[in-house]
Structure formats: C-alpha cells, structure tokens
Amino acid sequence: MQRRGAGLGWPRQQQQQPPPPAVCPRAAAMAPPSGGVPPGLGGRPACALLLLCYLNVVPSLGRQTSLTTSVIPKAEQSVAYKDFIYFTVFEGNVRNVSEVSVEYLCSQPCVVNLEAVVSSEFRSSIPVYKKRWKNEKHLHTSRTQIVHVKFPSIMVYRDDYFIRHSISVSAVIVRAWITHKYSGGDWNVKWEENLLHAVAKNYTLLQTIPPFERPFKDHQVCLEWNMGYIWNLQANRIPQCALENDVVALLGFPYASSGENTGIVKKFPRFQNRELEATRRQRMDYPVFTVSLWLYLLHYCKANLCGILYFVDSNEMYGTPSVFLTEEGYLHIQMHLVKGEDLAVKTKFIVPLKEWFRLDISFNGGQIVVTTSIGQDLKSYHNQTISFREDFHYNDTAGYFIIGGSRYVAGIEGFFGPLKYYRLRSLHPAQIFNPLLEKQLAEQIKLYYERCAEVQEIVSVYASAALRGGERQEACHLHNSYLDLQRKYGRPSMCRAFPWEKELKDKHPSLFQALLEMDLLTVPRNQNESVLEIGGKIFEKAVKRLSSVDGLHQISSVVPFLMDSSCCGYHKASYYLAVFYETGLNVPRDQLQGMLYSLVGGQGSERLSSMNLGYKHYQGIDNYPLDWELSYAYYSNIATKTPLDQHTLQGDQAYVETIRLKDDEILKVQTKEDGDVFMWLKHEATRGNAAAQQRLAQMLFWGQQGVAKNPEAAIEWYAKGALETEDPALIYDYAIVLFKGQGVKKNRRLALELMKKAASKGLHQAVNGLGWYYHKFKKNYAKAAKYWLKAEEMGNPDASYNLGVLHLDGIFPGVPGRNQTLAGEYFHKAAQGGHMEGTLWCSLYYITGNLETFPRDPEKAVVWAKHVAEKNGYLGHVIRKGLNAYLEGSWHEALLYYVLAAETGIEVSQTNLAHICEERPDLARRYLGVNCVWRYYNFSVFQIDAPSFAYLKMGDLYYYGHQNQSQDLELSVQMYAQAALDGDSQGFFNLALLIEEGTIIPHHILDFLEIDSTLHSNNISILQELYERCWSHSNEESFSPCSLAWLYLHLRLLWGAVLHSALIYFLGTFLLSILIAWTVQYFQSVSASDPPPRPSWASPDTATSTASPAVTPAADASDQDQPTVTNNLEPRG
C-alpha cells in the first residue's frame, strides 16, 4: 500500500513522465520508486496506443461509491481551512481494477478530479482513466471516497485469443486535484484547463508488470476446439525475448594479480531489451549502479595508484567509475563529469591486508556509498557515504572495463575474487548477492600466506643472525692462506645455537635442515632480497636431487623443500608444486593444491605459472572455467615480457625451437660445444665460411641447437664475419650489436658505417636499421619514415611496425595527429610477418574492440598473445633441458622437464611428452597420476597447427578405445579427417579402411574434405576418391600402400564387372548346355556298343572337372567383395 501526504510537489507538465519521489529530479523518468528496473513499454503496434486514446473519452470505466465519512472539525468555525487532497492505493501494482481511497477537504464548492496516465518508450502522459465529482455541500470537512480505477486489459493481461496486442508500459501515474467551482474550475472546463486552476494536487506511481509476467484473463468464453487448437499453434510461434538482467558477473574464479601492467579486459554490450537500454541511456548523466568485488591484498600500492576496477572510454581516458588503491591503503574513486572534467575522492579508511574482504560501491546520482565487509559472515568493517553536487557522465558501453593493471597503471598485488556489476541499480550491501565462490581455494590462499609469513620470519632472523656471527668471526680470525683455503673449500660453518622453540622446529623440519646446511655469509643484507636468495638456494638444492638418475623417485621427499622455497618468494618452486599436484607426478593428485600453487606462482609473476593459468582458462580444463578474458590477462603478461627477455643476456633462457622427438633428422643435428656438428661449423667458420660464421654466431647468441648461450663468443664471430667477409647479414648483425652495446662497447660511428654497407647490398633489415638510427638518435622522423617505407616495400615486418608507431604517436611526416586505424593496419601487417610487438598490439586491439578495424574477439586476442608468450626464453630453457636429457638417455629428467613444459600449453612439448610415454609406458604408469598418452595427445589436437600424427594417434585411440575411453568411431573419423585435411596420406588411407569395414562417413565430414556427396553417391566412388588422394599426398616415389590399395580396388571392380556381365552368363550357359548334350550322347553311344579303349584325357571325371566352374558366379562375386590385402587392414597412426 502506498500513501502520499499533502504538500507534495506536482511534476511539471512535459512530454516525459514525472520523476519518482525517491530520487532527485534528474533521475530517469521511468524509474520506479523502489529503484528496480522498470519493465518498460515495448514497440507494440500503433493500434494498441490508439485504443488507449479511444478510452480517454469514457469518463469513468469503473464503479464508484457514494460512501463518505464526515469528520467534525475540532476547531471553531472562524478558523480558515486549507484545501488538501491525498489518496491511498491499496494495491501497489497495476491491476484490472485498482481500489483507490481519496481523502480531501474543500473550503469552497469544488470539483475533485482523478486521472490515471501511462507512459511508454515512444509516448508519455496517455490518459486511460478519468473521473470527477462535485462537492458543494460538505465544506470545511474532510471526506473520503472509494474509487475503483479500471485499467484496459491490454496493459494488465497477457496476449490470448481475444487480446492480440497487449502493450508494455514503463510508468503509471495516478493523480488527483481540486479546483474551486467559482475560480475557473467548473464542471464544464476541459481537463487540461482545469488542472491549471488546481488549489491542491497530489500524485503517486504504480508498479507495472512486464508482459510475460502478467496473468491470462478469464474471458468466461469457451472457444470451439478447432479455434482453440489453431490459436495454441499460433501462440507457440510468438517470439519471446529471453529475460535480460542488468547483473553482470565480471569474474567468478580467483584472478592472481601480480601488480604489473596487465589485467582483465571486459566490455559491456548494449541491452537487447529496449526498455533496459532506454533506461541506461536516460541515466548517462545520473549514474545508478553498484559494484561488488572480493579482494585479498598482499601489499598496498608501491606506486602512486594501483588499478582495481576502472573504465576506459573510446578516447583512452578514464571514465566513471575508476577505483584505485593508494600507497597508504586508501581507496581512490574517480568520476568523469558531464562538463568534461574529472573528479576524485579518497576514502577516510584503509582496506585490510591479507584478509578476504568484499568491497561494495554504489552510485545513486551524486551519492556514493563505499562499504568493506570482512570474512564469510560479511562483518562490516568500514562504511562511508560521499555526496556531490556535480553531474557525472556515465556510459558503460562507450569503452571497456579493466580489472587490475593495464598499460596506463599497474594493478594491485593480491587476488581478485568474484566480481558482480549491477548496471542499473543502487543496492545496499545487504541486498547484494555476491558470495565468495571457490571457498576452499580462497581459504587455502589465506592459509598459504599465513604459513609463509612464519617461514619468512624464520629465514630473515636466521640470515641476519648468521651474518652478524660471520662478521664477528671475520674480525677475530687471523688472515692467512690456510684459513682462506679452508673458508673457500671447506664445509660451511653451521649455527646450531638459535633458541627456536621445539614446536616450531617440528613444524618446519625441512626449512631448518636446509638453513643449517647453507652458507649464509654471501646472501644480501636487505631482508627481502636475502629471503628471496635463500629461497633460490633451497630450490637449487631440490632441483639437483630431481636431476639424479632416479629423480622422479625423489619427488615426495623434495616437496617440503619446494614449499619452503615458494614461501620465500622463489616461485619457480611454486610452478613445480603446481605441476606435481595437477598431474600426480609421484605425489597424490590434488587439484586444489595444484590450483593454489599455480595461482601463487602467477601472482609472483612466474612465467611458466602464468602460462599454465592462461592455458587452462583458454581451454577450460582441469576444473578451470573457460574464460578468454582471464586467459588473456595471464598470457599478455608473459607476452609483454618476452621481447624484453630476449634482449636480456641474463637468466636461464634458451631459444624456443620446434624439435619433435619423432623427427630423427632434426635430432641428428642437435649438438653441444664438443659435438661433431659444432666442431665442424667452427672449423668452417675459422676457414672464412660466411654461412658457417653466421650460423655459429646465432647458435651461441641465442642458445640454439643444444649449444649453451654465450653472447661474448657469438659477438667475436659476428665481428670476424663482418670485418673479413662481405656477407650483408653478418655485417648487419654486428652493427646491431655495436649500436646496442650487447656484450661489447658501443661504437655508434662504426655501427652506422656497417649498417649503410649492408643496406647498400640490398638487405632489407639494414634499410630498416637506418630508419631506426635516424628515429632514435637523430630524431629525424622524415628520414626515418623514408627508410621504413622503403624497407616495408621490401617485405620487412619491423619496418611495418615502426611505421605504425609513427602513426600511433602522431609524428608521421605530413599526417597531422594520431591515426590509430592506420597504425593498427601496420601493426597487423607486422604481426603477420612474425613481429612480436606488432602481434601484441593486435591482441590488445582485439580484446578491447575500440577500433572498428579490429572488432572485439577475445579468443583471437588470446591466440595472438599465446603465440608470443610461447617464445619466452625461460620456457625454451626448460624445453632444452628436457631435450638434452632425452638425447642422453636420462628418462627421469626428460619426463620431468617435458611435463613442466607441456603443462604451460605449448604443443610441441605435449606431443613430445606423449611420445616419451609411448616409449616408456612403465615410467609413465609408475610416476604419473594421469593417462599420459591420452591427456597430452588430446591436448595437442586442440592446438592451432597441431601435427597430423597427433590427429592420427587420437583417431587410433578413439578407434580401439583406451583405458576408460570406449570406442567412438564418430570421433575417430573426425580425427582422421583432420589429418587428411592437413595433407597426411595416412588420414585418407585410414578413412578408406573404415569405409571398407562398413563405417558410414557423415556428409559434414565429406564436405569438410571437399568431397562432393552428389558426385560420389556410393562407397565405391568415395573409396576411389580417398585412395587417389592418398596416393597423390604420398611422399614415396615407388609403390606405396596407397597406390597398392588403389590398384587392388580397381582389380576387384574389374573382376566383379567381369563376373557380373550378362554376356558371360549367356556364353557360359550355352557352352554348358552343349557340353551336357555331348556327354549324354556319348554315353548313349557307348552303352549301345562295346566301349573302345578310353583315352587318358577323355575320362568323365576329367571332363567334369575341367568343364564345370569351381563355384557359381554369384558365390564367387560375394567372396571377391571381401578385401584380401596382405597388409594390416586396421587403421594405424
């Protein structure tokens, strides 16, 4: 029940409905007083609105009662009474008949007016009910009258046979007013003029009901069965829009934010529901929305601001809302104003650290309410209300949201939990439904950091005490050669006198053991650096045990050391633990612990952990939800670092090479510094062979082909080749080294001479290098653009990227201002040429969708970022260690490192690991808790450009069935078809054999292979096509299985045609008849006379055996239909 009192203001008479009383006049006109989303008026036919207008002429559609209640005024008659009117609606929403109680008082003879008007998306203030009555006798007395307001059926009920065009209204206003009879408000005055003379007035809003939530009207009419049946058929075909909600779940699974310049990008589409979209547009200058997110912060911001959630508009500027964290722990909330400026406010409270809390921020016009609640019970922590008088600009579709970091600002250090966004509602925290999902994982994260705080404190105290003890020993000991040798080569001194509690020692036995065996005199004095270095030493000790002959057997004993190393912030150990638990590598498989350590490693910016998280979210496997935006956040972090890592000559890095263990030719050329291939290259390079010098320098500079990375030695060969030969590639490489000073002193003058020399020989890289020189050192953009345009015409991707940078920065000669569209085109061209930075820009454009030439495509953005991330040198180092171990026959170490590489999602390591598990199934069954062959071949076939042999292998596994996987011929056919499409002859051969066995190839597979089913309508025709393609794709020059199968098929067809020929049947029957007649005549002649001596060839048995066929033609034909090739007819990989 809604009750309105006297003295309330009357809305202005405009073409839009009055604002609700609960919000200020700037609120959207169609907003209901409850703050909820109005259902609105849909685009129904104009006849419905005309019907509403027609209803206006009816003075009253409902019943009325003359029941009144007299109130005897307590005041004296001389008191001046003031006119008033107010009413009560007993039902808050629109009904067919709504009962309204009108209470009023007239000081003079008056006319009481009651009217109901509705508004839609296209029209407003349409009257649907009017009623007026006089009051001339009962003056100075409060009176009450009950009115039954009847609304039209088309706005109360759903469509049915009689109501064909029900309409959706956004707001219903019931208003009443009083006019004095002798002051221009007589009975005969028009309604519009009467309203102008009102002495008292009031109004209220009724809640509307969406069309599909309304009841059906009981017409009390029974349709004939045929008419009812026809209507039901028609009613089922009425298009019904899906229920659209304004709640958006931006994040459901925890996101590990490393505090760097990468984050999750989300974009809101426009509402499909026209009423919701109209509401959103009307609130662009009066934002009404709520944000609710869970956070677990490890540290406050190290910079000025760190991103939590912020909006970036189409002009790459911050919009409304933008929420940041300050270095003191306060929240910085920023809004964009309608007048074009920005306004920011800082909360009075700080947010908690190392505690899960929910942050709720609600906007209601100029009022912002910020609430933080802690724990599962959401115990209120802080609450603050901030009010402004400025008008905020809010358009949540004209840009994109970022969760965490971006290229504009770094993200927070910690974890994001579930994040919900209410686009059209301002809610109290008690009204928000945003529980902490993945509760077990969230609790494990909290327990991990609690344990690690204890570990870090032990390590820090132990290290500082050991350093102080070492300083005292240095001060007391004499310096002589013997003591120096003892300190250098002897066992490190162990400190056993620290007064640790026994309970603490029992809780961390592996940590104390590692500390006692470690020389701590060389660790840095800075507390954070010393803890990290000690974690690295513990990790190296663990890895050394894993690299032994029976390394996999040592995993269970190494896990505690890896846990301690992870707690010290050395997150390579975190990734090892994540892989061990996710794959069950000699430990019980535990998905929860695997997720925990993978997230911890990702938060610590460990490259392999981030790639593991990106891959799992990209494919939606191992209980990770499929989320391309979340996958992009992890992959883009590593992809951004990959070019920088390649130019850094530090760390355990190696060039990522695509080396397959099935390819014996590639394995033969793998070498080391003392290998035959390397020694031969070195010999040829010494003799002045330019190609050998270039290859040798590349191997040493990048660490390729099994050679350890040695930039100093590589530069010597670059210099020797550049100065002794005329090879332009060597001259260019050495010039770049001199420009950048990589391993050699910078010499810009000599570098420029060499670069010009290489360019004069037509090397497009050198032409691009000249442009780079004039851009970087001379700031001559015109000359730089000239060289880059020339190099770009020669096909240089670096030049395309550089031209894009000029357009992006707005410094391209002759082109005013920035041109992101043209820059994007150049970046795309560079990316197609393999340029990493160009690929990164393209992935950014695809994830944001801010350029028309790059429509938003999160999946494509992930693919491009993944492509760059998988070139990271730290991943290449792990792959190289696995390959070296395989070549040396160290199976344990090879399996370990290939598992570590395969879990990052790189395809070549997945197929190589599956190959190792095929070669050593005993090793895989003993140490791995997953079906190795099935898991990693299955992973590989979902990769882009997967090898054809992986499809063949999966086809075989589906064909035969594998462990828990039953036979599935349909999937087997799909795998073989994919291999065939990749040009593998074995795929065509296996498909043909499946047809020989009676398998039916679906039409969509034939279309996939571009085999016209209309031209090849039977299996024989399809077999011919498959065997011909198999033969054409075969690499063998002589006879191949495909050619033999094709020949055998045609022989069978020829033999069948011969046996089934009508002419052969006729000749056979004729000859048989002659033979039988001659035999009968012969026996008759013999029986009539004495038999002569029988010739050896005329015996009946001989004649019978030679004249009669061994089998009938029909039987022979049926036997010939069975394939009898000598080779195995089963499909093979």
Image (spheres, helix red, strand yellow):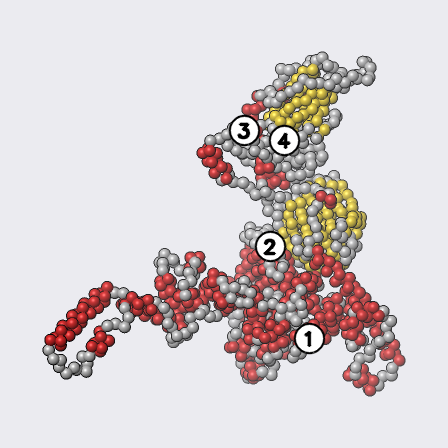
Tell me which residue sits at (57%, 21%) in the image.
57
Are circles 4 and 1 on residues that touch, CB within 8 Å? no
Q: Which residue is mark 1?
A: 554
Residue drawn at (19%, 81%), measured in percent from left and top? 1097
Nearest to N terminus: mark 1 or mark 3: 3
Pointer 2 or 4: first along the chain? 4
- Say which amino acid is labelled 3: His
Distance CA(mark 2)–CA(mark 1): 44 Å
Question: Cβ–Cβ below 8 Å for labels 2 and 4?
Answer: no
Q: In 3D space, how far apart are the residues under numbered discs 4 and 3 (Cα atoms)? A: 19 Å
Q: In the figure, 823 relative to 219: above or below? A: below
Q: CA distance from mark 1 to mark 3?
A: 81 Å
Q: Which residue is mark 3?
A: 219
SS state under label 4 = loop
Q: Earlier in the sequence, mark 4 or mark 3?
A: 4
Near-viewer residue (54 or 439): 439
Q: Which badge, 2 or 1, comes first in the chain's sequence? A: 1
The residue under label 4 is 94
In the image shown, does 338 or 964 lie closer to the viewer? 964
Q: Earlier in the sequence, mark 3 or mark 2?
A: 3
User: SS for tag 1?
Assistant: helix
